[in-house]
Amino acid sequence: LAVLAGVHSNMLDNIETDIMTKLHNFNLCAACWGDEYADAYALDVIMATEKCMATPMPMEDMMTEESMEEDFELDMEEKEGKLLVAKEKAMEKTDSFKLTKEDLMMYKDDMKSKISNFTCVMKELSFLTKDGEINGALFAHTEELDLLALPEAKEHVQFSSGNKAGADPVFLKKLSEELGDCAKVSDSFPKEILDKSPFMKKYGRMAMYAMCIKKVERQNCAKYLMAEMFDAYGIDYDIPMAADRYDGAAMAAKIMYKQASPEEIHIDDYFWGEMDM
């Protein structure tokens, strides 16, 4: 049985783990905001990606990259000394270890291409301003948050959709405030720490902001779904110390998990956990 399971898990027509994760995240988005929003959001990302991939790097970005070249080279010289020492030690154990300056420059060029295209997409989706600054005003709370519509889009798809999370003013206010906190945190991060690295000096705040807003949106959508599920099943999750029903649902889920037996967790993991358990 173990052999059969191993063979089956490596079949060429199986869905890769990272693709499965993306399907889960898309379905989370649809369950939270509605199918119309999720479809439009996915289409906006595709359109922005295609546009950016077909657009040469802006001249000002190229000039900025060139101005960073000297800093990068100095950084590389310092690291190369350490790498040579590590290489000499590694060569004592194997002859297959080879890391050249060309390898490092290839890695740098690959990272520059990824960052350039990612930054372009973030601008197209209005997460960043056209100048590459964090667009903190994007998540200012209004009665109906109008988000993630490309400038040339004919129709904007709003968060509020039917009876989903967007229909609850409490949820929208909670989400917009926490998303706004992401901009505040990235803006207030100590400059002297970011300046220690040429990469972090240029992209550090954007990277922190991008990771933060993704986590905040998914975490709050998960809390929304937990609250909706508890309501449907008649589970009490009224916790006095919780700020709202969404935080209450998250706390209740943790308490229930801590109180579950190993057997209950094992069964739950089989039906709802990762495929490889």
Image (cartoon, rainbow, N blue to C red):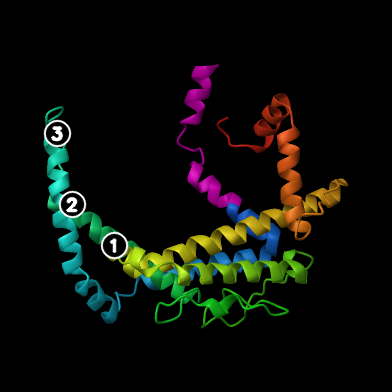
Q: Is residue 87 left or right of residue 49?
A: left
Q: Which residues are magenta?
A: 1-24
Q: Between residues 236 and 266, which one lies in front from this camera angle?
A: 236
Q: What amino acid is found at the position of numbered circle 3 in the picture?
A: Lys
Which residue occupies the foreground of this view, 72 or 13? 72
For this view, does 17 lie left or right of residue 241?
left
Is residue 116 visible in the rendered structure shown here? no
Q: At x 62% / y 64%, what residue is drawn? A: 38
Which callout, 2 or 3, points at the residue further toward the start of the chain?
Answer: 2
Q: Is residue 2 above or below residue 178?
A: above
Dot 1 falls on a residue whose secondary structure is: loop
* Picture coordinates of residue 162, whole percent (x, y): 77, 68
| Distance in Å between CA atoms under marks 2 and 1 | 12 Å
Where does label 1 land, which residue?
A: 197
Q: Are marks 2 and 3 in contact (CB under 8 Å)?
A: no
Verify whether residue 21 appears in magenta: yes
